[in-house]
Amino acid sequence: MTADTARDLTEGTEPGSATAAANPFDASDWATPFGLPDFEAIRPEHYVPAFAHALKAHEAEIAAIAGNEAAPTFANTVAAMERAGAALDRVANVFFNLTGSNTSPELQAIERAVAPQLARHSSAITLNPELWARLSAIDADAEALGAEERRVLDRYRVRFQRSGAGLAPEAKARIAEIAIRLAELGTQFGQNVLADERDFVLPLDGEDDLAGLPPFLRDAAAEAAGERGGQHSHVITLSRSLIEPFLVFSMRRDLRALAYAAWTRRGENGGATDNRAIIAEIVRLRAERARLLGFDSFAHLKLDDTMAGSPDAAMELLRNVWKPALQRAAEEREGLQALVRAEGHDFALEAHDWRHYSEKLRRAEHDLDETEIKPYLPLEGMIRAAFDTASKLFGLTFEEVRDVPRYHPDVRTWLVRNADGSEVGLFLGDYFARPSKRSGAWMSAFRSQERLNGDIKPIIVNVMNFARAPRGEPTLLSFDDARTLFHEFGHGLHGLLSDVTYPLLSGTAVSRDFVELPSQLYEHWLQQPEVLRAHARHVRTGEPMPDALLERLLAAATFNQGFATVEYAASAIVDMTLHLSAAGEDGLDVVAFEADALRRIAMPAEIAARHRAPHFAHIFSGDGYAAGYYSYLWSEVLDADAFDAFRETGDIFHPETAQRLRRTIYGAGNLRDPREAYTAFRGRLPSIAPLLKKRGLAA
């Protein structure tokens, strides 16, 4: 399907036609086990008519609410809006999950067409003067609304205000135009990055090219070569689970340089997939939108409704971490350069060398070898570890179900229950890298928990990009991979354990700088000796990780943390600086801007930002983390302090603390302001000290 044939979703196939009759989205519910989407019946050609019908239905529902002649009440306005749009949510949840995890040229064409249509539809709702008047007129006190209803009403009012509901007609029209254009640009940005990742391969032909690569990486590179047609015996792709270990282990400095250049220049290669002009337009439009809404910058707009509250607060945290991280990174650099000299080389350490020599230094200082660790971290074992931790904390059980629809053969499904046997929801795991999947790891929902429309159980998915082992062999994870699995499963629990009435408040629908708390907090359990002793077992013998190896692994937890903190914080600082600036107004050379921003904070030449702007999908493929990449660090302040609540009891699975954690954080969705939510769990707001200690940046 071309973009032309998908352009106007309001002109889809009419209900009752032969095409519509065969459309799996026509039924009000999926006639499948657990109400899973009927993945195996859905075809690309079903989406355009499904979106068309769902948009028309939602438009009619909104028109009825806005035109209701009865006096506005919570029930006939807010609750009615929460009930509206079920058909649209249904098709959108399936479609956008698949465009990230299992896309195709057909889906990408539809995505380019549907994104501006949905932006136009959303703006028509939030800029509707009748709806805004009804929301403004509801008297929460007169209706004696409960706490959850008050929160939903407040969130609707904030959402409408931040979308321009209170503006003059001309400004509203411009806000709507900006939203449509940003949807187009964000979609193209993400597709460009995926194209650069998909199209690059570094062939490794012969033993010379494979020098230094351990068996697990050779196997993964051979598997990747087979998936890409088998023209080469081994290839390295831009999947993080391949390129990062290649940069660690390859003895070929020239090949490391080639791979690293491709990795860092995604979206910056000229031609149809170059993102630099797209970024300039996005930044300019975001700045214009912020001004129309009365804010000094897009960063001020974005952080006005967050836990941080202002760019100054976020930047203060980044500055407090940057100085000790920079000092630590300088010490690490000297150690690596000394190792280069000790090997008889006279070159200056470069960015593509850091991971290689860092691993050698880790071996020397901690007697720790990645190839020694990985056999104790099989994917199956780490999945069990994540599940067992949830069982000990929250009483959950996980039963794998096999005879259910799947959107890809790799996908696995588990039924999740409470300790009393009651159903929590479904958890889907999609663990392996493939060309049809964007890079990274994430959690999403095919269906979110709520009770307004019945006792709706969530369907949550974790998507990873682990390098698959050869057929018949177990996939082994690095410790960073295992941490990623725990991180995303923490997000998954945030969605699964949601216990709210209204869809708007469900699961992860919280402030951006609070949403990483449940995921980053969950990582802590992976690093506890009793969890590793129980689950880090040798893939062949089943023997637990030896105590000596376990102790060395945990002792190295803060190794290279100067580097890790600098590469992350640099990206966060560039993100915030970019969105505080009005540079986009007169045209923006994003690469020059980024270089200048890094120069001003004395970024070490030997370290690159974790995400360079041309491929920084967090902030440009949509605006979820735009002016918000600092959120990971903000949430890390919370998670370091929150885990101390368990340490202080002397029991990392302390039942009362775990119960309070489930009630106030994992299960609470957006029932309350994030500061109130954290205080409800911890009794106070956090300090930065546990974070600095966790990263080894303070004594």
Image (cartoon, rainbow, N blue to C red):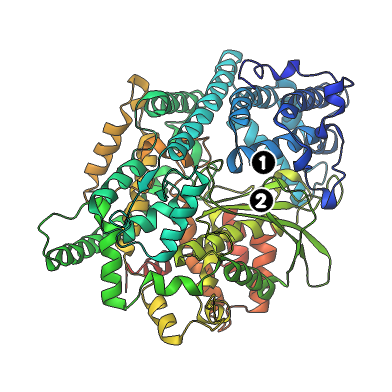
User: In which quarter of the view is residue 284 placed?
Assistant: top left
Q: Give the mark nearest the N terminus, 1 or 2.
A: 1
Residue on which disc 2 sits:
670
Q: Label 2 crowding class (10 Å Cα cut-off): few <14, some 14-19, many 20+?
A: many
**Where in the figure is residue 371, as x and y percent of width and height?**
40, 70
- Camera-nearest residue between 40 and 679: 40
- Whether residue 186 is visible to the viewer of this picture, yes or no, is yes
Left or right, 367 with respect to 402, comes to left
Is the residue under label 2 in contact with that under label 1 (CB below 8 Å)? yes
Is 519 above or below relative to 24?
below
Q: Which mark is residue 608?
A: none
Task: Indicate the quadrant where residue 153 lies.
Answer: top right
On residue 155, which mark appears?
Answer: 1
The residue drawn where x is 50% and y is 75% is 376
The quadrant of the image that shows the C terminus is bottom left
Farthest residue to the bottom: give it: 547
